[in-house]
Image (cartoon, helix red, strand yellow):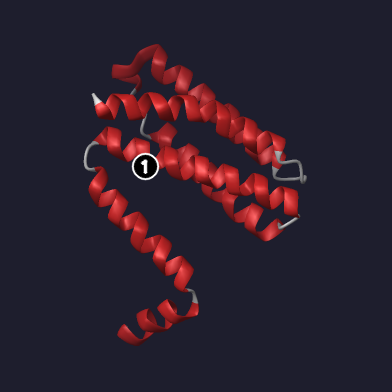
Amino acid sequence: MIVHYASSLVRNPADTYRQVDLVGRTAQAGDGAGLVTLLYDELLAALRVAAIAAERGEARLKSEKVTRATAILFALEAGLDFDKGGSVSQALADLYAGARRQVIAASIGNDPAPFRAAAENLAEIADAWRQVRAA
């Protein structure tokens, strides 16, 4: 087991660093608002890298980031509390579903604009979560 772990560190140190960084940030996030903020940060980063990958024609990287972004959008939607959140939760669910459709449709081509547009729209919500966390 130790040999497998050590060999994976050597094989892809960048992935290992990202994993350690994410675990550390998750531990620091603490509360629910912190975790949501972390998800938004990861989502926005994935969308921005997908845009760059689309521009450069890097299909594999774009695919990885599209997969990551859609998984995060599903996670954000799954975390909604419709009983407590009411119409706000429904509006966020609709936003996440629309963003998923936009990202998946954009994944077919090499136009970075839809990825950037999705990131811009979601950045406003991310900023609101940062304000909630700071309060």
Query: For the point 59% across and 43% down, which residue is it?
Result: 48
Measured from the top left, where is residue 86 in percent x and y?
36, 14
Three-letter code, disc 1: Leu
Query: For the point 63% across and 48% down, which residue is it?
Result: 50
In the rendered image, which quarter contains the N terminus? bottom left
* Number of numbered discs overlaid on the protein picture: 1
- Badge 1 marks a residue whose secondary structure is helix
Above or below, 3 relative to 106:
below
Where residue 32 sits, quadrant-wise, is top left
Query: For the point 49% across and 37% down, which residue is it?
Result: 73
Residue wearing tag 1: 38
Asked if residue 49 lies left or right of residue 82, the reply is: right
Q: Is residue 66 visible?
A: no
Asked if residue 124 lies left or right of residue 120, the reply is: left
Q: Nearer the viewer, residue 78 or 17?
A: 17
In the rendered image, which quarter contains the C terminus? top left
Above or below, 114 relative to 90:
below
Where residue 7 sits, quadrant-wise, is bottom left
Q: Is residue 120 visible?
A: yes
How busy is the neighbourhood of tag 1: few (under 14 within 10 Å), some, or many (20 plus)? many
Asked if residue 129 lies left or right of residue 120, the reply is: left
Query: For the point 37% across and 82% down, which residue is it?
Result: 6
Above or below, 87 relative to 50:
above
Measured from the top left, where is residue 45 in percent x and y?
51, 45
Q: Nearer the viewer, residue 83 or 11?
A: 11
Above or below, 69 relative to 6:
above
Measured from the top left, where is residue 40 in percent x and y?
43, 37
Measured from the top left, where is residue 22 in percent x and y?
36, 55
